[in-house]
Amino acid sequence: MPASSEGPATAGRLQNTEPPENTEPPATAEPPENTEPPATAEPPATAEPPATAEPPARAERAVILPKHLHARPAGLIAQAAARYPQTTIEIVADGRRADARSILAVMALGAVAGSEVLVRTAGAQADGATATVVAILTAAED
């Protein structure tokens, strides 16, 4: 074996100093001419309501309490309010407001027999919610 000027690590390897025969870059796949997205059965959903949507219904009614607004009627009001999830129900007494869905907030109003209470509702079922809460507030004591 002839002596080589290369070190022992490169002695057994062949070195190719000629450029490869094919110097063209590899062919890339071209996208098809029709690049439209596939059709879907449903149109894309929009977050905005239609322009013809009516504003939410509102109702307001004042009642004079025949009894104190304590735990039992406050619980009944909260249960009734839960049946109207698309409606905001508020009770106002002596300038204080309470969300009708909260028993504690309704009781914290401190409304007593003979005081005036205002029931305000807004939403899809405002009239029905108002009538239900007013019926509970004006019902005779059990």
Image (cartoon, grey):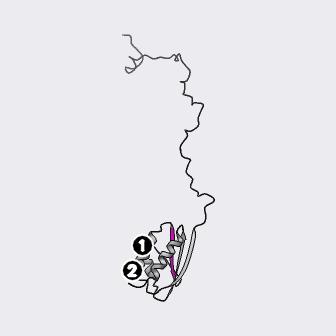
Between 126 and 29, the one lying in front of the other is 126
Q: Which residue is mark 1?
A: 79
Q: Is residue 107 magenta?
A: no
Residue at image point 57% right, 72% down: 58
Residue 65, image x, y percentages? 48, 85
* Residue lying at the far top of the rendered structure: 1
Type of residue at label 1? Gln
* Circle on res. 102: none
Q: Is residue 89 magenta?
A: yes
Q: Quadrant location of residue 56?
A: bottom right
Residue at image point 39% right, 13% down: 3
Residue at image point 46% right, 72% down: 81
Residue 99, image x, y percentages? 48, 74
Q: Under tag 2, what secondary structure?
A: helix
Q: Residues within 10 Å of mark 1 (few under 14, many from 20)?
A: some
Residue at image point 61% right, 64% down: 54
The mark nearer the N terminus, 1 or 2, is 2
Type of residue at label 2? Arg
Distance in Å between CA atoms under marks 1 and 2: 11 Å
Residues drawn in magenta? 87-92
The quadrant of the rendering that contains the C terminus is: bottom left
Q: Quadrant location of residue 106?
A: bottom left
Between 102 and 122, the one lying in front of the other is 122
Q: Which residue is mark 2?
A: 72
